[in-house]
Amino acid sequence: MSKKHEKSGYTWINPLAAWGTAVGNAAAPSVEVPDIREDWDKATGYKVKTHKVGRLKHYIIWPNHGEKLWSRWRWWPTRRNLLHVTGIYNRKTAIAETKILDRRPLYWLICLAFLAIAPMLFPDNMQNTLLTAGTIFGIFAAINVCWTLIIGTASIFSLASYAVVGTAAFLTSWLSVTYGVPWYVLPVIGAVIGLVFGVAIALPALRLDGFYYALLTLGLNELCRVFFTTSREFGSASGGLYGADSFISESWDPMVQSHVGYYSAFLLLLMSLSLFRLINGKRLGRILRMAPEKREAFAAACGVDYKRARIMIFLITSVALGFIGGFYAAQYRGVAFSIFSFDTVLLGLAMLAIGGIGKAEGAVLGTLVVIFLDKVLLDWGPMRHFMIGALMLAAVLFLNNGYFGIKKQFNAWREKKRGEWRSARTEKGGEALPEEATEVDDKDQLYLRRFDKIQRDYLKTLITPEIIEEHRRQPLGQHSEALERVLLYFRRARMEDKYALHRAGPEGPYKIIAFSGTRGVSPRLVDDREFATVDEGYHGVFMRRVHDLMES
Amino acid sequence: MDVFFVLTNAITVACIYGLIAVAVSITWSSLGLINLAYGFVFTFAGYGAWLVSQHVGEHPLIIAAAGIAMGALAGVLVCLVVFIPLHDKPNFTTRGMIATLAISLIGSQSFLMFFGPRPKSLPDLFGFWSVDLFGVTLTSDKIGIVVCSALMLFLVVRWMKGSRRGLEIRAMMMNPHAASIVGIGIRSTGIYVMAVTGAMAGLASVLLSQTYYIAPFNGLTPLIKGVSIALCGGLGSVQGAVIAAILLGLVEALTNEFLGGQYVLMTQFLFIIAVLVVRPRGISGLLDKAREQ
């Protein structure tokens, strides 16, 4: 039965025998009881290697007042909250607390404020480079935010965004150069051109799906490049078309010009971000969140007209891109052919891929990284684009959705690992599984079950033929320590299904019954075995309990 | 300019771009990967062949073999970097496409760093001779290009139809999931596919270098043309790609003849858009839902 039994040979002497009060068991062969503390330490010791990985969500929690639980900042005439805040009572201390559930608006505010004051923080020797780069960053980030609307929200994988911007910029510059159109009209004309272009390329989008469309738009981009570079009207010789009217006067101080350029680009970025918010966060965006790729049929069955919504977004965004194109022409007095080059599309895609496709913050961060590498670290030469390519490749290979997808991906990975570790260390028995443990409200139950399992494991080592024989000889009275421990455990069992003896007649026989545990519900007969005397009955109950213990 | 001269030109170029189109097509249909790194494979093979011609020998067979081998090597490289780590990850198609674009960005910049911006030229493979056929003068390089690319295409199609590996690739085209269940290794098949298609792009590179130079950014045009042809013919169909290559070659020749050279891309794209609007999956593309990934 157990190893302890083999090395036994131990005889228990009844201490009561010295007074002559022991009845029938002055000495009995038994087993030595091992020190329970060793078993306890072994059972409660934590054998699994643990890692210091945070597991709580670190919300910043502020004190609150019970009266103010529901008072919030709101956008003035509406009831909309400024921040997604929840007021709660701490479960342990019952103190009122408030916590911000969605902190992204705060981060946006901080980052945009930083961008607004950034020109004051630039070092003097880099001022010019950084302002130029900042201007390009603003414009490209605006383009990429619009592009994110197309690729992410509308899930139309179009690579022709720069072609729309470039076409609008070229046509408006040409109008301005040829007919002297003033600068403030250029973005408006650009928007109209964008709309026309958008309608033209939205037609195939209705028919083609996914990657056919991507490849087609890639070709369209190349088509625009070849068309504009080879046509004489658009200055094929000079590498671009320049001479358009601009809101930046050339008579100003160069520094002032750079600052005006920077802040106008910043304003453009703010405009495109609010467009993103208006589309993605409102009806159109919500409709399309209902109809992600490959589940369009389901959405359509629910009454969502996703095609219409996609085309709407596509057209609105094309207008915005055309506006940006006109703005670009007005800002730089013209436009270069490089806007159509394959490298521009590649860099744009790198910006989206690094930050994470489908998120405005991803588009802005990716643009920041790529523009910094491309326009600030000019000394690195071809190495810059190599670095951008490597970053893009790494982002795509290792991250599911760019930088801003890391958190979700990491959480999913950690959940997976946690499940693996948990299943590796879970033992069968009365112990609660961790998943179950979080469900049980009374944590005492968990400790009880754990303790019970340890105790049962320990008692199993004491069950030997010797103590069974000892019990058979004398069920009641003083017993050896091993048997006494086992019996104490048995006697402490819960009333539910606890065994008892039922005397069938005035002198026996006895039968084993089990209590129901519920008042008023009669006990059930366990089996038909009959015991002639009460001592045999006691031993029968004991054997049944031993059996149950060894089975558990 | 004579119609037949333009036509033979168009056919020659269509043969080369057709090779890349077939490569793009096979890769997409069997692996589900939109491989936009064929520009990189193309340039890699070109520079490899150039290095061999500089250091080993100028025999045409050596150069052609070097181009094919280098193309296959570059294809396997792309497979190891992109397909094998990504093929079982979420958003595989988008991420695969972006990753191959990243490789082409990295590739062209590294070629620029290693070989400099000056273009390189390969020695003539087919000598200088010409045949007069029904009053049309066919020069040696045109005949050589057409014969070589047709031979390569024939061999690849034979291999795909006749061999065990070809059977595996065709099984992957039909249903990658079922193919993996019956014991076809997705990764090993990926390596074969990429090696074979890379070899095709390598040959195209060597053949095209008879007309153009090898430069860091020269892979782009063949890629765009190849992708357009594959798109027009229907991704996943070899005969579609061949038909599309011939049709687009015709369009190019006719535009050159009647409108002028600068409109070639426009008419070609209008043609492609027209084809795609009528048949959204190309001339003989796989039916809807045939390949879901």
Image (cartoon, coloured by chain):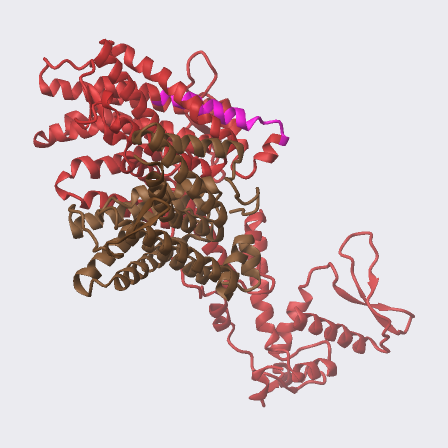
Q: What residue is drawn where x is 43% and y is 58%?
A: B193
Q: What residue is drawn where x is 52% and y is 57%?
A: B170
Q: Is residue B102 left or right of residue A93?
A: left
What segment is highlighted magenta in the picture? A301-321
Q: Is residue A131 left or right of residue B233?
A: left
In this view, the residue in front, A541 or A355, is A355
Q: Residue furthest front?
A: B135
Residue A106 visible at all? no
Q: Is residue A95 above or below residue A315?
A: below
Q: Is residue B199 above or below residue A124?
A: below
Q: Is residue A156 left or right of residue A327?
A: right
In this view, the residue in front, B216 or A510, is B216
In this view, the residue in front, A501 or B235, is B235
- Residue A426 lies, in percent from the top left, at 53, 62
- Residue B159 lies, in percent from the top left, at 47, 62
Q: Colour of chain A?
A: red
Residue A133 visible at all? yes
Q: Is residue A184 above or below residue A351?
A: above
The quadrant of the rendering that contains the N terminus of chain B is: top left
In this view, the residue in front, A545 or A435, is A435
Q: Colour of chain B?
A: brown
- Residue A482 lies, in percent from the top left, at 61, 77
Q: Is residue A41 left or right of residue A388?
A: right
